[in-house]
Amino acid sequence: RDKQYAIDEHSEAGTVVAKLTVVDKNQQDGAFVALTYTLEGSCNNVSISDLFDVVETANISGVRTVEISVKDAELLDYKRLNANNGKIETTLSVKDAVGLSATAKTTIIVNDVNEAPAVSDQSFTLAEKNEDGSDWKAGKQVGVVSASDPDGASLAYKVVTAGVPFAFENGTNKLIVTDGSVLDYETKTVWNL
């Protein structure tokens, strides 16, 4: 029977996506026959077996509990797998030791999760005064900060450090002076934001 499950992208390896029940009452030499489980298919050139593990976790009188779990958190990326809005269609194949088999269609939806922007440490140099010795006027550009968003969203910038004479111009990545009168090399040579 076709089942549908959902998981957030980049979920940790071992995170259970689905629990399934498989019934095989066949016995051999007084013991229940061992079963082999395989997830078949691929999505955007990524093998489903590279994304997920399938493991039998319990067998009570031939009624087996099978878990599908995340195998590779990095590969489980919405943008990489973006087929049909994150929908991955796969087939669970179950085979026993004597060669009998059964299959079930399984759909796994990979949810797109908002990922944090990335910014690295950056430094800018600015003379303490204008060439004529006057203070820098508010709005003097100090530098342009480089940052990115893995989801491709536009970014808004803000200085959160209190008491510094700098800000981002209207939320853009342009760092500007807000109060040039406090820029004095002899008093403070480095401002950390």
Image (cartoon, helix red, strand yellow):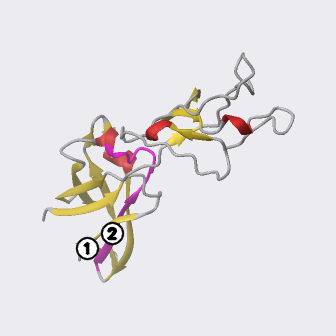
Say if the magenta span includes residue 171: no
Which residue is at 60% across, 39% downward?
Answer: 178
Residue 44 placed where, x, y %?
27, 36
| Quadrant of the image occupied by residue 5 | bottom left
What segment carries the magenta color?
62-78
Q: Indicate whether 41 appears above or below 141.
A: below
- SS assignment at label 2: strand
| Residue displayed at 32% across by 51% down | 112
Q: Residue furthest bottom?
A: 61
| Mark 1 vs 2, N-terminal side | 1
Height in image: 110 above or below 59?
above
User: Residue reaching furthest right?
Assistant: 186
Are discs 1 and 2 less than 8 Å apart at CB? yes
Q: Determine if residue 97 is in view.
A: no
Q: Which residue is mark 1?
A: 21
Q: Name which residue lies at 21% across and 47% down.
A: 85
Amino acid type assigned to the residue bearing label 1 in the image: Thr
Query: Residue at point 60% right, 37% down?
Result: 120
Q: Can you identify the residue that label 2 sits on? A: 66
Q: Position of residue 173 (x, y in %)?
A: 49, 34
**Residue 191 coordinates in the image, percent (x, y):** 73, 40
Q: Is residue 143 rendered to the left or right of residue 52? A: right
Nearer to me, 2 or 191 = 191
Query: Is 7 displayed left or right of 176 in the figure?
Result: left
